[in-house]
Image: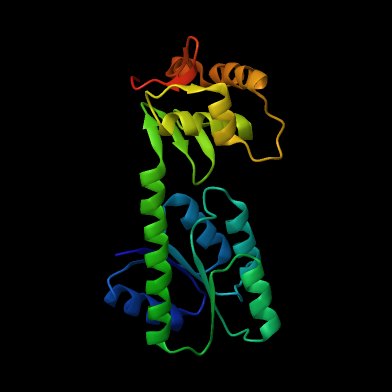
């Protein structure tokens, strides 16, 4: 079962999509305008958006652009459903971040099949992201979104600080020397040396606040992530 948002202004098509999607086992919410659709997206999570392009208040392409620019929403798959079937329209839609494009009139079985594919991929990605997340108390390290949160607030880490924290947290209790850490986090572009590792660790601890002691110094070796919260 997936949560699907239908952003469509035609009542007959709203009913058609709602009926068939619910029959296919999904939970369906319908919004008749772009603004209503964005409101629903920010109010509750969805696993897929079916988006019409010709809406009464704002263009569906603009709605797509807003979704993809919003960090909290950008992972939601979007299937555009529209009467605009020219190749140039499809290119623009996909270029703005739509995952698929279906032209009206469409076969309902084809639409349902495409929905199943996108929903399945999205749910698999979400499950994979959950497995990769590391959480200690209310400290969350999210490698998929490449961010760290404490009590729900984003911690502004640099790329090197994030790499250091994520690598150490992925191997709790294991001590790594400075050169080992360089090998693990280096990308051949950033200027990071064994001496600057100490600086990055010091800055990282400051930003971690009450969780600063999770990154421990191992005398004569280097650093490790504590197994104790």
Image position of 70 (left or right of 113):
right
Q: Nearer the viewer, residue 5 or 127?
A: 127
- Residue occupying the point 37% across, 66% down: 120
Looking at the picture, does residue 67 appear above or below residue 58? above
Q: Nearer the viewer, residue 122 or 188?
A: 188
Q: Nearer the viewer, residue 176 or 40?
A: 176
- Residue occupying the point 29% across, 65% down: 1
Total marks placed: 0
- Asked which colour scheme the image uses, the reply is rainbow
Residue 201 falls in which quadrant of the image?
top right
Q: Nearer the viewer, residue 172 or 147?
A: 172
Find residue 151 and report its horizontal and vertical position in percent. Answer: 44, 28
Image position of 83 (left or right of 14):
right
> In the current view of this chain or complex, which residue is farthest to the top?
219
**Residue 155, visible in the rendered structure:** no
Which quadrant would the C terminus be assigned to in this image? Answer: top left
Find residue 218 and report its horizontal and vertical position in percent. Answer: 46, 13
Residue 91 falls in which quadrant of the image?
bottom right
Find residue 174 and report its horizontal and vertical position in percent. Answer: 40, 24
Looking at the picture, does residue 92 appear above or below residue 97? below
- Residue occupying the point 57% across, 65% down: 34
Looking at the picture, does residue 193 appear above or below residue 163? above
Find residue 9 and report its horizontal and vertical position in percent. Answer: 52, 75
**Residue 126, visible in the rendered structure:** yes
Image position of 193 (left or right of 39):
right
- Residue occupying the point 38% across, 80% down: 113
């Amino acid at each position: 079962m997936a949560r699907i948002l239908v952003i469509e202004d035609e009542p007959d098509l709203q009913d058609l999509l709602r009926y068939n999607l619910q029959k296919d086992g999904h939970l369906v919410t319908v919004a008749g305008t772009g603004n209503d659709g964005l409101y629903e997206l920010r109010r509750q999570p969805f696993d897929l958006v079916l988006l019409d392009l010709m809406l009464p208040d704002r263009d569906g392409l603009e709605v797509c652009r807003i979704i993809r620019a919003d960090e909290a929403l950008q992972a939601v798959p979007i299937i555009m459903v529209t009467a605009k079937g020219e190749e140039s329209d499809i290119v623009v839609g996909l270029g703005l971040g739509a995952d698929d494009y279906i032209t009206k009139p469409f076969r309902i079985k084809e639409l349902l099949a495409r929905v199943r594919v996108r929903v399945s991929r999205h749910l698999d990605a979400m499950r994979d992201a959950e497995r990769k997340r590391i959480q200690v108390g209310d400290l969350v390290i999210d490698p998929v979104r490449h961010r760290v949160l404490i009590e729900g607030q984003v911690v502004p880490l640099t790329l090197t600080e994030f790499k250091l924290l994520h690598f150490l947290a992925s191997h709790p209790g294991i001590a790594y020397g400075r050169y080992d850490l360089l090998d693990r986090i280096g990308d051949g572009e950033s200027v990071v040396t064994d001496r600057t590792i100490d600086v990055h660790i010091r800055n990282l601890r400051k930003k971690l606040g009450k969780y600063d002691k999770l990154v421990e110094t191992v005398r004569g070796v280097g650093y490790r992530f504590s197994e104790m919260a």
